[in-house]
Image: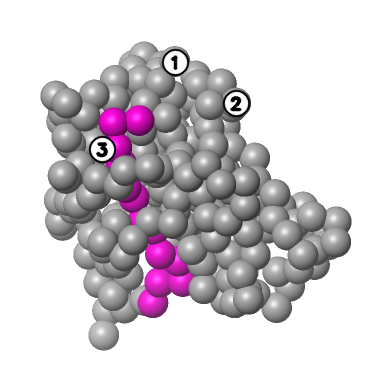
């Protein structure tokens, strides 16, 4: 049986719902930053390609901004090796606050946020570094948000890890939930021992540069 020339996700215009969740981010010094409910889960499309997902992504919002949580199941055999130059895991998000689907180059409303997770020296906890990065070939660059605005938390679990990020409205150029409830959205979750996971098409396409390949996130509530 011959393999498909194009991934099945290429044939769909993917749209996912994100419910309104008040009181995020949480102010507690310890514990979950977001604790998003199951209703915030982004659809799992890995089965379209005959694969099984190893991470779940949830997205919730309120007038203050956008909350994103990633939870990975399981750890590779070498996950806690102290010498991993590639880091423990990496997560990238692309957001278009105008959901412009008819352009192939990013506009000033398109933003990329990159998270790098590393193990602490005692190998019992995770540290995260998050920054906004420019998008290659953009017709105009979005303003770069200060890393101090990006609230995030990472933790090791008994059988995996969790990363939570809250992007305040002032860090999302063009975010205006009162007048626009549709965002362009894409993600990539990576670690050194498993295939990268995406919402739709992957890096076989210019996912990081072309917002027409991103999915739609509908802000509900």
Structural distance between the alpha carbons of marks 3 and 2: 24 Å
Residue farthest bottom in this picture: 1
Mark drawn on residue 184: 3
Main SS of the magenta segment?
Answer: strand
Q: Dots 3 and 2: beta carbons under 8 Å? A: no
Residue 77: give its label: none
- State the separation of the CA atoms marked 1 and 2: 14 Å
Q: How is the image coloured?
A: one colour
Identified at 34% across, 50% down, the residue is 59
- Quadrant where the C terminus sits is top left
The boundaries of the magenta stretch are 52-64
Q: Residues within 10 Å of mark 3 (few under 14, many from 20)?
A: many
Q: Which residue is mark 2?
A: 148
Figure quadrant of residue 103: top left
Q: Which residue is mark 1?
A: 143
Q: Quadrant of the N terminus?
A: bottom left
């Amino acid at each position: 049986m011959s393999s498909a020339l194009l991934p099945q996700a290429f044939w769909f215009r993917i749209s996912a719902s994100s419910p309104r969740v008040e009181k995020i981010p949480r102010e507690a010094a310890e514990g979950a930053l977001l604790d998003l409910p199951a209703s915030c889960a982004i659809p799992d499309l890995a089965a379209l390609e005959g694969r099984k997902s190893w991470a779940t992504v949830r997205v919730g919002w309120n007038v203050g901004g956008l909350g994103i949580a990633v939870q990975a199941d399981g750890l590779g055999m070498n996950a806690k090796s102290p010498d991993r130059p590639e880091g423990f895991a990496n997560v990238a998000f692309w957001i278009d606050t105008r959901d412009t689907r008819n352009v192939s180059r990013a506009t000033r409303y398109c933003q990329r946020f990159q998270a790098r997770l590393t193990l602490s020296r005692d190998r019992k906890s995770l540290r995260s570094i998050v920054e906004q990065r420019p998008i290659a070939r953009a017709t105009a660059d979005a303003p770069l948000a200060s890393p101090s605005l990006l609230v995030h938390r990472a933790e090791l679990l008994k059988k995996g890890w969790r990363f939570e990020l809250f992007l305040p409205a002032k860090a999302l150029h063009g975010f205006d939930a009162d007048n626009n409830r549709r965002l362009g959205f894409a993600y990539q979750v990576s670690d050194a021992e498993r295939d990268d996971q995406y919402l739709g098409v992957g890096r076989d396409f210019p996912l990081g540069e072309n917002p027409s390949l991103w999915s739609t996130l509908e802000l509900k509530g």
